[in-house]
Image: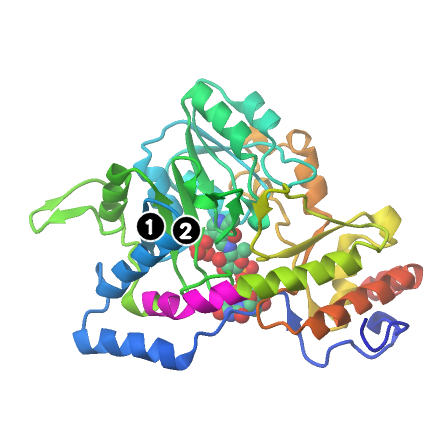
Amino acid sequence: MGSNQAKTPAVLGGEPEFATPLYYTRARVPDRGVFDSYVDRVFESAWFTNDGELVRELERRLADRLGVGFCCLFANGTAALLAALKCLDLDGQVLTTPFTFAATVHAIAWNGLEPVFCDIDRDTWNLAPDAVQAAATDTTSAIVPVHVFGVPAALANLERIAKRRSLALLYDAAHAFDVRVGEAPIGSFGDLSVFSFHATKLFHTMEGGAVVGSDPALRDELALLRNFGIVNEEEVRGLGINGKMSEVHAATGLALLEATTRDVDRRRRLAAIYEQSLGAIDGIGFQRTADDTAGNGSYLAIRIEPERFGLDRNQLHDALRAENIVSRKYFYPLCSENEAYRHLPSAARENLPIAHAVASEVLCLPLFGDLPADDVERVVAAILAIHRAAPAVRRALEEAAR
Ligand code: T4K
Protein backbone atom coordinates (compact mmCIF):
# COMPACT_ATOMS: atom_id res chain seq x y z
CA MET A 1 0.00 0.00 0.00
CA GLY A 2 1.17 3.55 -0.68
CA SER A 3 3.07 5.70 1.76
CA ASN A 4 0.06 7.39 3.27
CA GLN A 5 -2.70 4.92 3.96
CA ALA A 6 -4.08 7.26 6.64
CA LYS A 7 -3.71 10.32 4.43
CA THR A 8 -6.18 13.17 4.45
CA PRO A 9 -7.99 13.38 1.09
CA ALA A 10 -6.98 16.44 -0.93
CA VAL A 11 -10.59 17.70 -0.99
CA LEU A 12 -10.31 17.92 2.80
CA GLY A 13 -7.08 19.91 2.65
CA GLY A 14 -4.52 17.09 2.42
CA GLU A 15 -1.59 17.01 -0.03
CA PRO A 16 -2.69 15.75 -3.47
CA GLU A 17 -1.46 12.16 -3.96
CA PHE A 18 0.27 13.13 -7.24
CA ALA A 19 2.14 16.37 -7.93
CA THR A 20 1.18 16.32 -11.64
CA PRO A 21 -1.90 14.81 -13.32
CA LEU A 22 -1.98 11.05 -13.72
CA TYR A 23 -4.30 10.42 -16.69
CA TYR A 24 -6.44 7.31 -17.09
CA THR A 25 -4.30 6.33 -20.04
CA ARG A 26 -1.07 7.28 -21.76
CA ALA A 27 -0.24 6.27 -25.31
CA ARG A 28 2.62 3.79 -25.81
CA VAL A 29 5.48 5.60 -27.57
CA PRO A 30 7.24 3.48 -30.23
CA ASP A 31 10.96 2.84 -29.96
CA ARG A 32 12.45 5.66 -32.01
CA GLY A 33 15.13 3.51 -33.69
CA VAL A 34 12.67 0.87 -34.86
CA PHE A 35 10.15 3.51 -35.96
CA ASP A 36 12.85 5.40 -37.88
CA SER A 37 13.96 2.26 -39.68
CA TYR A 38 10.43 1.85 -41.07
CA VAL A 39 10.09 5.56 -41.87
CA ASP A 40 13.44 5.43 -43.74
CA ARG A 41 11.89 2.81 -46.05
CA VAL A 42 8.92 5.11 -46.65
CA PHE A 43 11.13 8.12 -47.42
CA GLU A 44 13.37 6.12 -49.74
CA SER A 45 10.41 4.89 -51.74
CA ALA A 46 8.57 8.25 -51.72
CA TRP A 47 5.39 6.12 -51.46
CA PHE A 48 3.33 7.55 -48.59
CA THR A 49 -0.16 6.14 -48.99
CA ASN A 50 -2.58 4.23 -51.31
CA ASP A 51 -2.04 0.56 -50.45
CA GLY A 52 1.65 0.99 -49.67
CA GLU A 53 4.16 -1.68 -48.74
CA LEU A 54 4.05 -1.05 -44.96
CA VAL A 55 0.25 -1.07 -44.87
CA ARG A 56 0.31 -4.44 -46.62
CA GLU A 57 2.99 -5.77 -44.28
CA LEU A 58 1.01 -4.64 -41.22
CA GLU A 59 -2.17 -6.21 -42.65
CA ARG A 60 -0.40 -9.56 -43.03
CA ARG A 61 1.09 -9.45 -39.55
CA LEU A 62 -2.15 -8.39 -37.90
CA ALA A 63 -4.21 -11.04 -39.72
CA ASP A 64 -1.72 -13.58 -38.39
CA ARG A 65 -1.70 -12.23 -34.85
CA LEU A 66 -5.46 -11.74 -34.63
CA GLY A 67 -6.10 -15.21 -36.10
CA VAL A 68 -8.37 -13.99 -38.90
CA GLY A 69 -8.63 -14.57 -42.65
CA PHE A 70 -7.97 -10.94 -43.55
CA CYS A 71 -7.24 -7.57 -42.00
CA CYS A 72 -8.15 -4.48 -43.97
CA LEU A 73 -6.56 -1.35 -42.51
CA PHE A 74 -8.32 2.01 -42.34
CA ALA A 75 -7.47 5.60 -41.41
CA ASN A 76 -9.37 5.20 -38.12
CA GLY A 77 -11.85 2.89 -36.42
CA THR A 78 -14.82 5.06 -37.38
CA ALA A 79 -14.03 4.84 -41.12
CA ALA A 80 -13.61 1.08 -40.62
CA LEU A 81 -17.08 0.87 -39.00
CA LEU A 82 -18.61 2.98 -41.79
CA ALA A 83 -17.17 0.74 -44.49
CA ALA A 84 -17.96 -2.51 -42.65
CA LEU A 85 -21.63 -1.55 -42.34
CA LYS A 86 -21.70 -0.39 -45.96
CA CYS A 87 -20.29 -3.61 -47.39
CA LEU A 88 -22.82 -5.72 -45.47
CA ASP A 89 -25.52 -4.07 -47.63
CA LEU A 90 -28.00 -3.37 -44.83
CA ASP A 91 -31.27 -1.52 -44.62
CA GLY A 92 -33.84 -0.56 -41.98
CA GLN A 93 -32.92 -0.94 -38.32
CA VAL A 94 -29.72 -2.02 -36.59
CA LEU A 95 -29.74 -3.19 -32.98
CA THR A 96 -26.94 -1.85 -30.79
CA THR A 97 -25.88 -0.82 -27.32
CA PRO A 98 -26.14 2.70 -25.89
CA PHE A 99 -23.16 2.00 -23.58
CA THR A 100 -20.41 2.70 -26.09
CA PHE A 101 -18.38 5.48 -27.70
CA ALA A 102 -20.32 7.78 -30.06
CA ALA A 103 -18.62 6.30 -33.15
CA THR A 104 -20.50 2.98 -32.96
CA VAL A 105 -23.90 4.62 -33.29
CA HIS A 106 -22.82 7.45 -35.60
CA ALA A 107 -21.51 4.90 -38.12
CA ILE A 108 -24.93 3.23 -38.20
CA ALA A 109 -26.72 6.56 -38.71
CA TRP A 110 -24.22 7.76 -41.38
CA ASN A 111 -25.12 4.63 -43.35
CA GLY A 112 -28.73 5.81 -43.44
CA LEU A 113 -29.76 3.10 -40.97
CA GLU A 114 -31.79 3.56 -37.80
CA PRO A 115 -29.99 2.62 -34.62
CA VAL A 116 -32.23 0.77 -32.17
CA PHE A 117 -30.89 0.82 -28.62
CA CYS A 118 -31.21 -2.33 -26.53
CA ASP A 119 -30.48 -2.60 -22.83
CA ILE A 120 -27.29 -4.13 -21.49
CA ASP A 121 -26.45 -6.91 -19.04
CA ARG A 122 -25.97 -5.75 -15.45
CA ASP A 123 -22.79 -7.79 -14.96
CA THR A 124 -20.92 -7.70 -18.29
CA TRP A 125 -22.20 -4.24 -19.36
CA ASN A 126 -22.58 -5.64 -22.89
CA LEU A 127 -25.75 -5.99 -25.01
CA ALA A 128 -28.32 -8.19 -23.24
CA PRO A 129 -29.40 -10.97 -25.65
CA ASP A 130 -32.96 -10.93 -24.23
CA ALA A 131 -33.28 -7.25 -25.06
CA VAL A 132 -31.90 -7.86 -28.55
CA GLN A 133 -34.34 -10.72 -29.09
CA ALA A 134 -37.24 -8.54 -27.95
CA ALA A 135 -36.25 -5.59 -30.16
CA ALA A 136 -35.79 -7.54 -33.41
CA THR A 137 -38.51 -6.94 -36.00
CA ASP A 138 -39.03 -7.55 -39.71
CA THR A 139 -37.18 -4.32 -40.46
CA THR A 140 -34.06 -5.30 -38.48
CA SER A 141 -31.09 -6.10 -40.70
CA ALA A 142 -28.14 -6.34 -38.31
CA ILE A 143 -26.82 -6.45 -34.76
CA VAL A 144 -23.79 -4.35 -33.80
CA PRO A 145 -22.58 -5.45 -30.36
CA VAL A 146 -19.52 -3.91 -28.69
CA HIS A 147 -16.99 -5.86 -26.61
CA VAL A 148 -17.04 -3.03 -24.13
CA PHE A 149 -13.73 -2.46 -22.28
CA GLY A 150 -12.45 -5.64 -24.00
CA VAL A 151 -14.97 -7.99 -22.35
CA PRO A 152 -16.51 -10.22 -25.05
CA ALA A 153 -20.20 -9.72 -25.83
CA ALA A 154 -22.61 -12.66 -25.38
CA LEU A 155 -21.19 -14.35 -28.49
CA ALA A 156 -23.14 -17.62 -28.62
CA ASN A 157 -26.54 -16.10 -27.82
CA LEU A 158 -26.12 -13.21 -30.23
CA GLU A 159 -25.03 -15.57 -32.98
CA ARG A 160 -28.11 -17.73 -32.35
CA ILE A 161 -30.42 -14.71 -32.68
CA ALA A 162 -28.62 -13.47 -35.80
CA LYS A 163 -28.80 -16.92 -37.47
CA ARG A 164 -32.44 -17.51 -36.62
CA ARG A 165 -33.45 -14.13 -38.06
CA SER A 166 -30.85 -13.95 -40.86
CA LEU A 167 -29.31 -10.78 -39.43
CA ALA A 168 -25.78 -9.59 -40.11
CA LEU A 169 -23.53 -9.56 -37.05
CA LEU A 170 -20.83 -6.89 -36.93
CA TYR A 171 -18.76 -6.67 -33.76
CA ASP A 172 -17.28 -3.38 -32.64
CA ALA A 173 -14.06 -4.80 -31.21
CA ALA A 174 -12.40 -1.38 -30.76
CA HIS A 175 -11.35 -2.31 -27.20
CA ALA A 176 -10.64 -5.99 -27.73
CA PHE A 177 -7.24 -6.28 -29.44
CA ASP A 178 -5.58 -9.64 -28.58
CA VAL A 179 -8.59 -10.90 -26.58
CA ARG A 180 -9.28 -14.65 -26.87
CA VAL A 181 -12.26 -16.76 -25.86
CA GLY A 182 -10.93 -20.23 -25.17
CA GLU A 183 -8.86 -20.98 -28.26
CA ALA A 184 -10.85 -18.59 -30.45
CA PRO A 185 -9.53 -15.11 -31.29
CA ILE A 186 -12.12 -12.38 -30.70
CA GLY A 187 -12.02 -11.28 -34.35
CA SER A 188 -13.18 -14.70 -35.54
CA PHE A 189 -16.81 -14.16 -34.47
CA GLY A 190 -19.67 -12.72 -36.54
CA ASP A 191 -19.52 -11.58 -40.17
CA LEU A 192 -16.92 -8.90 -39.51
CA SER A 193 -15.20 -7.19 -36.56
CA VAL A 194 -13.80 -3.69 -36.33
CA PHE A 195 -10.77 -2.58 -34.31
CA SER A 196 -9.65 0.94 -33.42
CA PHE A 197 -5.94 1.72 -33.42
CA HIS A 198 -6.33 5.20 -31.96
CA ALA A 199 -3.45 6.45 -29.78
CA THR A 200 -5.49 5.69 -26.64
CA LYS A 201 -5.78 2.02 -27.59
CA LEU A 202 -3.69 -0.88 -26.36
CA PHE A 203 -2.23 -1.38 -29.85
CA HIS A 204 -2.19 1.79 -31.94
CA THR A 205 -1.05 3.47 -35.13
CA MET A 206 -1.62 7.02 -33.74
CA GLU A 207 -4.84 7.09 -35.77
CA GLY A 208 -6.04 3.92 -37.41
CA GLY A 209 -8.44 1.03 -37.49
CA ALA A 210 -9.20 -2.25 -39.21
CA VAL A 211 -11.99 -4.50 -40.38
CA VAL A 212 -11.22 -8.19 -39.99
CA GLY A 213 -13.09 -11.24 -41.23
CA SER A 214 -12.81 -14.38 -43.31
CA ASP A 215 -14.87 -13.84 -46.49
CA PRO A 216 -12.55 -12.77 -49.37
CA ALA A 217 -15.47 -11.14 -51.20
CA LEU A 218 -16.05 -8.82 -48.23
CA ARG A 219 -12.31 -8.09 -48.11
CA ASP A 220 -12.34 -7.01 -51.77
CA GLU A 221 -15.41 -4.84 -51.21
CA LEU A 222 -13.79 -3.17 -48.17
CA ALA A 223 -10.60 -2.44 -50.13
CA LEU A 224 -12.73 -0.74 -52.79
CA LEU A 225 -14.78 1.23 -50.27
CA ARG A 226 -11.75 2.65 -48.49
CA ASN A 227 -10.32 3.94 -51.80
CA PHE A 228 -13.29 5.88 -53.23
CA GLY A 229 -14.58 2.73 -54.98
CA ILE A 230 -11.79 2.93 -57.57
CA VAL A 231 -11.66 -0.32 -59.54
CA ASN A 232 -9.21 0.89 -62.17
CA GLU A 233 -8.24 4.06 -64.04
CA GLU A 234 -11.57 4.20 -65.80
CA GLU A 235 -14.03 2.70 -63.31
CA VAL A 236 -15.30 3.92 -59.93
CA ARG A 237 -17.92 1.69 -58.32
CA GLY A 238 -20.24 2.45 -55.40
CA LEU A 239 -20.04 5.02 -52.62
CA GLY A 240 -16.42 4.68 -51.58
CA ILE A 241 -14.68 7.07 -49.20
CA ASN A 242 -11.10 8.00 -48.48
CA GLY A 243 -10.51 5.64 -45.55
CA LYS A 244 -6.90 4.68 -46.29
CA MET A 245 -4.16 4.33 -43.70
CA SER A 246 -0.90 6.13 -44.52
CA GLU A 247 2.53 4.49 -44.55
CA VAL A 248 3.77 6.48 -41.52
CA HIS A 249 0.78 5.32 -39.49
CA ALA A 250 1.51 1.75 -40.55
CA ALA A 251 5.17 2.31 -39.51
CA THR A 252 3.94 3.17 -36.01
CA GLY A 253 1.95 -0.05 -35.84
CA LEU A 254 4.84 -2.20 -37.09
CA ALA A 255 7.12 -0.57 -34.51
CA LEU A 256 4.64 -1.28 -31.71
CA LEU A 257 3.68 -4.92 -32.29
CA GLU A 258 6.24 -6.41 -29.92
CA ALA A 259 5.80 -3.72 -27.27
CA THR A 260 2.07 -4.45 -27.32
CA THR A 261 2.69 -8.08 -26.35
CA ARG A 262 4.69 -6.90 -23.32
CA ASP A 263 2.04 -4.29 -22.52
CA VAL A 264 -0.73 -6.89 -22.39
CA ASP A 265 1.24 -8.81 -19.74
CA ARG A 266 2.01 -5.69 -17.73
CA ARG A 267 -1.54 -4.35 -17.95
CA ARG A 268 -2.97 -7.69 -16.80
CA ARG A 269 -0.62 -7.68 -13.79
CA LEU A 270 -1.55 -4.08 -12.89
CA ALA A 271 -5.25 -4.85 -13.31
CA ALA A 272 -4.85 -7.79 -10.91
CA ILE A 273 -3.34 -5.46 -8.27
CA TYR A 274 -6.28 -3.08 -8.66
CA GLU A 275 -8.82 -5.89 -8.51
CA GLN A 276 -7.31 -7.48 -5.44
CA SER A 277 -6.97 -4.23 -3.47
CA LEU A 278 -10.16 -2.46 -4.56
CA GLY A 279 -12.23 -5.67 -4.41
CA ALA A 280 -11.90 -5.49 -0.62
CA ILE A 281 -13.53 -2.04 -0.43
CA ASP A 282 -17.25 -2.00 0.26
CA GLY A 283 -19.27 -0.69 -2.69
CA ILE A 284 -16.66 -1.23 -5.45
CA GLY A 285 -17.47 -3.82 -8.12
CA PHE A 286 -15.97 -4.94 -11.44
CA GLN A 287 -17.19 -5.93 -14.87
CA ARG A 288 -17.81 -9.68 -15.13
CA THR A 289 -15.96 -11.67 -17.74
CA ALA A 290 -16.29 -15.39 -18.52
CA ASP A 291 -13.65 -17.76 -17.08
CA ASP A 292 -12.49 -18.89 -20.52
CA THR A 293 -11.68 -15.32 -21.64
CA ALA A 294 -8.08 -14.16 -21.91
CA GLY A 295 -8.53 -10.39 -21.51
CA ASN A 296 -6.14 -7.66 -22.62
CA GLY A 297 -6.14 -5.29 -19.62
CA SER A 298 -7.05 -2.41 -21.89
CA TYR A 299 -9.31 -0.63 -19.37
CA LEU A 300 -9.70 -0.72 -15.60
CA ALA A 301 -13.36 0.03 -15.01
CA ILE A 302 -14.89 -0.01 -11.53
CA ARG A 303 -18.54 0.29 -10.55
CA ILE A 304 -19.47 2.36 -7.50
CA GLU A 305 -22.53 1.44 -5.46
CA PRO A 306 -23.17 4.79 -3.73
CA GLU A 307 -25.03 3.49 -0.66
CA ARG A 308 -22.23 1.08 0.24
CA PHE A 309 -19.25 3.15 -0.89
CA GLY A 310 -20.51 6.31 0.79
CA LEU A 311 -20.09 8.50 -2.31
CA ASP A 312 -21.45 8.29 -5.81
CA ARG A 313 -19.32 7.84 -8.95
CA ASN A 314 -19.27 11.58 -9.75
CA GLN A 315 -18.16 12.44 -6.23
CA LEU A 316 -15.37 9.86 -6.37
CA HIS A 317 -14.31 11.24 -9.78
CA ASP A 318 -14.12 14.79 -8.35
CA ALA A 319 -12.34 13.71 -5.18
CA LEU A 320 -9.76 11.83 -7.29
CA ARG A 321 -9.31 14.87 -9.52
CA ALA A 322 -8.25 16.81 -6.42
CA GLU A 323 -5.57 14.13 -5.91
CA ASN A 324 -4.39 14.79 -9.51
CA ILE A 325 -5.80 11.41 -10.54
CA VAL A 326 -7.74 11.93 -13.77
CA SER A 327 -10.31 9.15 -14.08
CA ARG A 328 -12.87 8.92 -16.90
CA LYS A 329 -16.66 8.48 -16.87
CA TYR A 330 -16.85 6.17 -19.93
CA PHE A 331 -19.51 5.88 -21.35
CA TYR A 332 -21.52 8.66 -19.81
CA PRO A 333 -23.84 10.05 -21.00
CA LEU A 334 -25.22 7.09 -22.94
CA CYS A 335 -25.29 7.42 -26.74
CA SER A 336 -29.10 7.28 -26.54
CA GLU A 337 -28.95 10.66 -24.75
CA ASN A 338 -27.21 12.33 -27.72
CA GLU A 339 -29.49 14.93 -29.32
CA ALA A 340 -29.18 13.09 -32.62
CA TYR A 341 -30.82 9.99 -31.12
CA ARG A 342 -32.89 10.90 -28.09
CA HIS A 343 -36.07 11.27 -30.15
CA LEU A 344 -35.90 7.57 -31.08
CA PRO A 345 -38.45 5.37 -29.30
CA SER A 346 -35.67 2.95 -28.28
CA ALA A 347 -33.77 5.82 -26.59
CA ALA A 348 -36.48 6.20 -23.94
CA ARG A 349 -35.09 5.89 -20.43
CA GLU A 350 -37.63 3.15 -19.52
CA ASN A 351 -36.20 1.00 -22.33
CA LEU A 352 -32.66 1.20 -20.96
CA PRO A 353 -32.80 1.03 -17.14
CA ILE A 354 -29.67 -1.06 -16.68
CA ALA A 355 -27.63 0.99 -19.14
CA HIS A 356 -28.58 4.16 -17.27
CA ALA A 357 -27.62 2.64 -13.93
CA VAL A 358 -24.27 1.32 -15.23
CA ALA A 359 -23.39 4.58 -17.04
CA SER A 360 -23.93 6.54 -13.84
CA GLU A 361 -21.79 4.21 -11.71
CA VAL A 362 -18.77 3.22 -13.84
CA LEU A 363 -15.40 4.94 -13.63
CA CYS A 364 -12.20 4.13 -15.56
CA LEU A 365 -9.01 4.38 -13.50
CA PRO A 366 -5.43 4.89 -14.74
CA LEU A 367 -4.11 1.81 -16.53
CA PHE A 368 -1.41 1.71 -19.19
CA GLY A 369 1.73 -0.23 -20.00
CA ASP A 370 4.18 2.29 -18.52
CA LEU A 371 2.25 2.81 -15.28
CA PRO A 372 4.47 1.87 -12.32
CA ALA A 373 2.91 -0.67 -9.94
CA ASP A 374 3.69 1.77 -7.16
CA ASP A 375 1.38 4.34 -8.78
CA VAL A 376 -1.43 1.78 -8.86
CA GLU A 377 -0.97 1.30 -5.11
CA ARG A 378 -1.07 5.07 -4.62
CA VAL A 379 -4.33 5.34 -6.59
CA VAL A 380 -5.77 2.54 -4.43
CA ALA A 381 -4.58 4.29 -1.25
CA ALA A 382 -6.22 7.54 -2.38
CA ILE A 383 -9.53 5.75 -3.06
CA LEU A 384 -9.36 4.04 0.34
CA ALA A 385 -8.70 7.36 2.11
CA ILE A 386 -11.61 8.98 0.24
CA HIS A 387 -13.90 6.04 1.11
CA ARG A 388 -12.97 6.18 4.81
CA ALA A 389 -13.69 9.90 4.98
CA ALA A 390 -16.78 9.62 2.74
CA PRO A 391 -19.24 11.75 4.79
CA ALA A 392 -16.76 14.62 5.16
CA VAL A 393 -15.71 14.32 1.48
CA ARG A 394 -19.36 14.51 0.42
CA ARG A 395 -19.95 17.61 2.54
CA ALA A 396 -16.79 19.30 1.19
CA LEU A 397 -17.76 18.58 -2.44
CA GLU A 398 -21.31 19.81 -1.89
CA GLU A 399 -19.95 22.96 -0.23
CA ALA A 400 -17.55 23.59 -3.14
CA ALA A 401 -20.39 23.17 -5.67
CA ARG A 402 -22.52 25.88 -3.98
N1 T4K B 1 -15.92 2.07 -31.16
C1 T4K B 1 -15.58 2.17 -29.87
C2 T4K B 1 -16.21 1.27 -28.87
C3 T4K B 1 -14.61 3.12 -29.46
O1 T4K B 1 -14.26 3.22 -28.15
C4 T4K B 1 -14.01 3.94 -30.43
C5 T4K B 1 -13.01 4.93 -30.06
C6 T4K B 1 -14.42 3.80 -31.78
C7 T4K B 1 -15.38 2.84 -32.10
C8 T4K B 1 -13.86 4.68 -32.89
O2 T4K B 1 -12.51 4.45 -33.15
P1 T4K B 1 -11.59 5.67 -33.71
O3 T4K B 1 -12.28 6.26 -34.89
O4 T4K B 1 -11.38 6.66 -32.59
O5 T4K B 1 -10.31 4.96 -34.09
C9 T4K B 1 -10.82 8.46 -27.13
C10 T4K B 1 -10.44 8.10 -28.54
O6 T4K B 1 -10.30 9.25 -29.37
C11 T4K B 1 -11.32 7.12 -29.20
O7 T4K B 1 -10.52 6.48 -30.17
C12 T4K B 1 -11.82 6.03 -28.25
N2 T4K B 1 -12.75 5.14 -28.84
C13 T4K B 1 -12.43 6.67 -27.02
C14 T4K B 1 -12.92 5.63 -26.04
O8 T4K B 1 -11.46 7.46 -26.39
P2 T4K B 1 -11.31 10.75 -25.97
O9 T4K B 1 -11.82 11.99 -26.56
O10 T4K B 1 -11.98 10.25 -24.73
O11 T4K B 1 -9.72 10.78 -25.75
P3 T4K B 1 -8.82 11.96 -25.14
O12 T4K B 1 -8.30 12.83 -26.21
O13 T4K B 1 -9.60 12.63 -24.04
O14 T4K B 1 -7.62 11.17 -24.51
C15 T4K B 1 -7.76 10.40 -23.35
C16 T4K B 1 -6.40 10.27 -22.66
O15 T4K B 1 -5.51 9.56 -23.48
C17 T4K B 1 -5.70 11.58 -22.38
O16 T4K B 1 -6.13 12.06 -21.17
C18 T4K B 1 -4.22 11.24 -22.40
C19 T4K B 1 -4.17 10.04 -23.34
N3 T4K B 1 -3.64 10.35 -24.68
C20 T4K B 1 -4.51 10.85 -25.64
C21 T4K B 1 -4.06 11.14 -26.89
C22 T4K B 1 -5.01 11.69 -27.95
C23 T4K B 1 -2.31 10.15 -24.98
O17 T4K B 1 -1.54 9.70 -24.11
N4 T4K B 1 -1.85 10.44 -26.24
C24 T4K B 1 -2.67 10.92 -27.22
O18 T4K B 1 -2.22 11.13 -28.36
O19 T4K B 1 -11.51 9.66 -27.10
Q: Is residue 18 left or right of residue 253?
A: right
Q: Callout 1, which amino acid?
A: Cys
> Crowdedness of circle 1 by 10 Å Cα count: few (<14), some, many (20+)?
many
Q: Is residue 365 visible?
A: no
Residue plotted at (91% across, 62% down): 388
Q: Note whether 92 is above or below 367 in the view shown.
A: above
Q: Is residue 137 visible?
A: yes
Q: Is residue 222 left or right of residue 375?
A: left
Relative image position of residue 341 (x, y in whole percent) = 53, 38
| CA–CA distance in space, label 1 to label 2 | 9 Å
Q: How many marks?
A: 2
Q: Note whether 384 is above or below 38 in the view shown.
A: above
Q: Which residues are magenta?
A: 250-262
Q: Note whether 125 is above or below 169 in the view shown.
A: below
Q: Nearer the viewer, mark 1 or mark 2?
A: 2
Q: Does the residue at mark 1 contact the one at mark 2 (Cβ under 8 Å)?
A: yes
Q: Which residue is mark 2?
A: 66
